[in-house]
Image (tube, grey):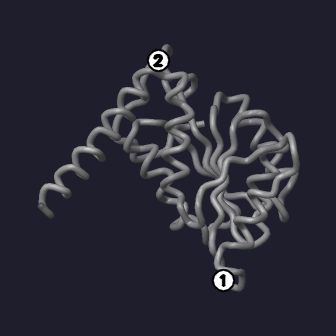
Amino acid sequence: MVPAKGRATPPLNCTRVLWYSHCMRVAVFLGSSSDAEKMSGVTDVLTEFGVSHETYCISAHRAGALLQRTVQDVVAGGVEVIVAGAGLAAALPGAIAGMTAIPVIGVPLAGEGGLGGLDALLSIVQMPSQIPVATVGINNAKNAGYLAVEMLSVKYPELRERLFAFRKRLSDDAEHTLQQFR
């Protein structure tokens, strides 16, 4: 597998020449190609932090066997976190979580004909006991990216430093905004 295009900086702490084969990696799954724009926030954040990622579009309902093979392949290839976005019944994150023991972050998406994403949110957060899916807000793909970065920062000190620097900038920006209103 090749790394996603558009990476801002190379991943950190890589021990092989083919850095994308043994470094922090995230797989992003979409339930439908129509979800691509809503899920772009995940890859934007991962790119910002230098985390390699690949994106896959596979319906849990229409292509279950293909989904299972793909999940097995990405996990065997070294992916450490999976982010899955889906709308309506939103089976994709839970189906993936049932296929692997690595962390899965679900992004409930508001779709046409649904309940504004509430249907997807409830589907993802109501996973059966022992098969958890971390869940972010409706259409909040960026937070899924930040959560993936936080998860990886436990293992990668250099990423943790980038995350702390990012949070410091947020704090500094808030302080600057406060000063403008005084």
Quarter of the image containing the C terminus? bottom left
Residue 52 is situated, as x and y percent measured from the top left of the image, at 49, 37
Residue at 37 percent of width and 27 percent of height: 161
Quarter occupied by residue 147: top right
The residues tagged by marks 1 and 2 sit, at their Cα atoms, a distance apart of 45 Å
Residue at 29 percent of width and 38 percent of height: 168
Quarter of the image containing the N terminus? top right
The answer to whether 57 appears left or right of 140 in the picture is: right
Q: In the depicted view, which residue is nearer to us: 136 or 175?
A: 175
The answer to whether 128 appears left or right of 112 in the picture is: right
Q: Residues within 10 Å of mark 1 (few under 14, many from 20)?
A: few
Up-down: is 116 above or below 3? below
**Residue of label 1:** 112
Quarter occupied by residue 27: top right
Q: Nearer the viewer, mark 1 or mark 2?
A: 1
The type of residue carrying mark 1 is: Glu
Q: In the depicted view, which residue is nearer to us: 124 or 90?
A: 124
The type of residue carrying mark 2 is: Val
The answer to whether 90 appears left or right of 150 in the picture is: right
Residue at 63 percent of width and 58 percent of height: 107
Tell me the element at label 1. Answer: loop
Q: In the depicted view, which residue is nearer to us: 175 or 9?
A: 175
Quarter occupied by residue 10: top left
Residue 76 is situated, as x and y percent measured from the top left of the image, at 73, 29
Residue 7 is situated, as x and y percent measured from the top left of the image, at 40, 42
Q: Which mark is residue 25?
A: none
Tell me the element at label 2. Answer: loop
Up-down: is 134 above or below 25? below
Residue 166 is situated, as x and y percent measured from the top left of the image, at 33, 40
**Residue of label 2:** 17
Q: How many marks?
A: 2
Who comes first in sequence, dot 1 or dot 2? 2
